[in-house]
Image: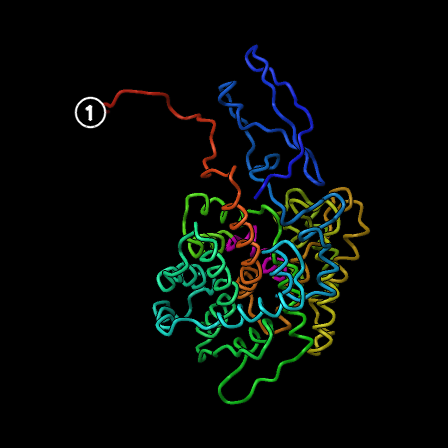
Amino acid sequence: MQSKALPKGSATLTVNGKAIDLPIYGGSTGPDVLDIRKLYAQGAVFTYDPGFMSTASCESQITYIDGDAGVLLYRGYPIDQLAEHSSFIEVCYLLLHGELPSPDQLAHFNHAITHHTMLHAQFDRFFEGFRRDAHPMAIMVGAVGALSAFYHDSLDINDPRQREISSHRLIAKMPTIAARAFKYSSGQHFVTPRNELDFSSNFLRMCFAVTAEDYVINPILARAMDVFFILHADHEQNASTSTVRLAGSSGANPFACISSGIACLWGPSHGGANEAALKMLSDIGNVDNIPDFIAKVKDKDSEVRLMGFGHRVYKNYDPRAKVMQKLCHQVLAEVGGTQDPLLKVAIELEKIALNDEYFLARKLYPNIDFYSGITLRAMGFPTSMFTVLFALARTVGWIAQWTEMLEDSSQKIGRPRQIYTGKTERAYMPLSART
């Protein structure tokens, strides 16, 4: 990847009486950056930024977020436009290649993905190594990492063609693995993918079809699943994406890198947030209990937290949440869940939070997790599968970011520094001399 950062002058930093010039670069949009790559060499100091809130670890052309304005762009396209007009497969192509495909390009790409959905025949035995009550995310971490033991012909990260094959395999096989993790935990037979179905319809069939009867695709639920995948496909340099890039910087194979992203996503502060939001709504239980809940949220001595509101990046309404809210109502109407008590609680809680000065002052707007848990539950997924679905969608974003990193000549193996505050050098004392 050729750098497109524009030089915008420099800043002078004085450290220990020494003046150091630091270049300033600007991107196509967003804040400028201060280039500190030579700071240690010239000034013998590091920067200190826990959580990397003010640090850009890479240059990227994939996803842009303006948290203050509530903007999310994939390759320049607003997320709401893609959710309304595009398909997940088309968004996959966009994230991987940088442009929307022509009809021929989309057909070719869709064929490549569709014909990689099958798993190696021996792979199904891998699931039997897990206990029946294993969490599906535990299965996902192990199974995706194990792909490298089955597909040796696409592990050379320096070969563009092999990178492309492994990318297609990951996008295609992730739904199959996810559906098998779901089926395995419920004690049902695995369902083989069908080439005539689109990506999301195929996935729903693999999850919910049973051998006793034919499975009929519900187009509204299939479209809802597709939009859910679009909304979760990428989200800039979040924790799991940064993990994939960090693992990839060492030269690890793509399957290992994506497995590391899945492991990071499993954390309740990342991919598990929608499950936490659904639990919160369940704990509230009834609209009548909301005032008491709100009072506890505002009480600084209370341990009650408002889940599904606020975001580390968005300081405005999460643009994905607006799409997810509409999607939630469509799904509930289709499955007869419009009287779902949790939806009533969610709507009333949102109304209160968006008009309460306490939440407005803290910019605690609803995020995507607020509605996604209700939607997925209405579609028939247990809470243990919520993060699995997130991982399935985010796979293409991880791959796009991983590929971009490998093609960036300025990237090096990740090696964050630290402020050491432990003991200074001291002599070893024999055991007999210690009291």
Looking at the rendering, the stretch of residues picked out in magenta corresponds to: 265-278
- At x 42%, y 66%, the residue is 134
Question: Which percent across, then down, holds residue 2?
Answer: 58, 41
Q: Quadrant of residue 20?
A: top right
- Quadrant showing the N terminus: top right
- Front residue of 82/130: it is 82
Element type where label 1 sits in the image = loop
Q: Which residue is mark 1?
A: 430
Question: Which percent across, then down, holds residue 124?
Answer: 38, 73
Q: Quadrant of residue 146?
A: bottom left
Question: Which percent across, then down, holds residue 316?
Answer: 75, 47
- Front residue of 364/8: it is 8
In magenta stretch: residue 271 = yes
- At x 24%, y 23%, the residue is 428
- Front residue of 201/94: it is 94
In magenta stretch: residue 218 = no
Callout 1, which amino acid?
Pro
**In this view, 365 is above or below 92:** above
- At x 49%, y 19%, the residue is 44
**Is residue 282 among the parts visible in the rendering?**
no
- At x 56%, y 52%, the residue is 270
What is the residue that sits farthest to the right in this orientation?
355
Question: Would you call the spot at circle 1 few (<14 residues within 10 Å), some (14-19), or many (20 or more)?
Answer: few
Q: Quadrant of residue 430?
A: top left
- Quadrant showing the C terminus: top left
Circle count: 1
**In this view, 273 is above or below 41:** below
What is the residue that sits farthest to the left in this orientation?
432
Question: Which percent across, then down, holds residue 276?
Answer: 59, 57
**Is residue 179 among the parts visible in the rendering?**
yes
What is the residue that sits farthest to the front in this orientation?
104
